[in-house]
Image (cartoon, helix red, strand yellow):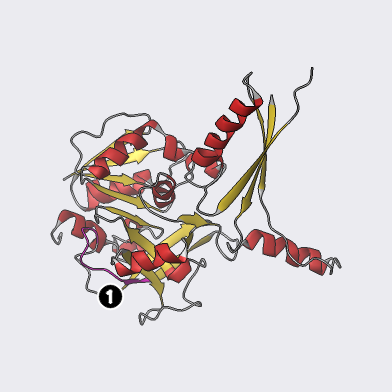
Amino acid sequence: MKFGIIVFPGSNCDHDCYHAVKHVFGQEAEYVWHKSTSLEGFDCVILPGGFSYGDYLRTGAIASFSPVMNEVVSFAKNGGLVMGICNGFQILTEAGLLPGVLMRNKGLKFICEHTRLRVENNESRFTSRYSGGQVVDIPIAHADGNYYADSETVARLEGEGRIAFRYSTSDGSVSVAANPNGSISSIAGILNEKGNVLGMMPHPERALEGELGSLDGRGVFESILGRVMP
Amino acid sequence: MRARIYVTLKKGVLDPQGKAVMGALGSMGFNEVKDVRVGKFMEVELDGASPEAAEKRLRDMCEKLLANTVIENYRIELEATSL
């Protein structure tokens, strides 16, 4: 598969994503500068983490008007796979590809730690390699990961199986104590209606190699690739 | 022409920054403080147009970029032009 990794001014996980795709999974990968106006030839587009435009105004707000975002929107409309991680998730909500918004963490602090996530939907293009209810260890690193949407939207996400991951304890129970940032309904990652766009605050690309303490992010990439990689 | 734009969190949206500021004020002895909401204030200079046209454009700016209407309200004030 050929992956495009969008680079906004201020992206800083673009290299992590490139490394994941290219070196860990042996796929084709290319950086795409945010001023690019074509995504031709890509099978999957990743919006990486970072601080695009310095998080000015609101996280992801200014990046969502970068020229490449028109292409990302049509790429997604045509069924292409789009994954936004951390700042990428924030950009996808600002661009209207995913509902809701990511607000300042409940505790106001930047949090960088391993979190446990419960896989809520294991039938999506991004999560099919996990088992339902599986608890995975994937790290977060953000100050604005407090997912918020109105109650109707949350009910719709829930009803349509569009909540991909929830923060949980290691035995899979969802509680206020296991919710690091105050996200409504402990939401850590969501899917769009068609299931071809995923946004998540945790970083699966940082949980692919034993040296980094967890291999649990592999499931996301293996699901995208449709097979288990050696 | 100059406009002032106020972006505030909608009612019911939790404002952790406001809560922290309120806590600090309380600990400083300002015990009468019942609530604090933190918002944004922007000044925008713009060319020419009539106040009506300017307001329409500013509204568009707020809807598209300056506010996220999922969680925020906005208010526009046009400054009277100096003659």
> Magenta stretch?
A117-126
Q: Position of residue A157 (x, y in %)?
A: 35, 64
Image quadrant of residue A33?
A: top left
A122 in the magenta segment = yes
Q: Is residue A89 left or right of residue A164?
A: right
Q: Position of residue A186 (x, y in %)?
A: 44, 70
What chain does badge 1 belong to? A
Compared to residue A198, the image places residue B35 above or below, namely below
Q: Position of residue A122 (x, y in %)?
A: 23, 68
The quadrant in which the N terminus of chain A is found is top left
Amino acid on which disc 1 is placed:
Gln
Nearer-the-camera pick, B8 or A220: B8
What residue is shown at x 65% (from left), y 59% (from top)? Answer: B17
What residue is shown at x 42% (from left), y 65% (from top)? Answer: A152
- Residue carrying label 1: A134
Query: Is residue A223 visible in this depiction of the protein?
Result: yes
What residue is shown at x 23% (from left), y 56% (from top)? Answer: A221
Count of all numbered marks drawn on residues in the image:
1
Q: Residue furthest right?
A: B29
Q: Looking at the magenta stretch, what is its main secondary structure? A: loop
What residue is shown at x 20% (from left), y 52% (from top)? Answer: A25
Q: Is residue A16 left or right of residue A220?
A: right
Q: Residue furthest front?
A: B52
Dot 1 alpha-carbon crowd within 10 angstroms: few under 14, some 14 to 19, many 20 or more = some
The quadrant in which the C terminus of chain A is found is bottom left
A189 in the magenta segment = no
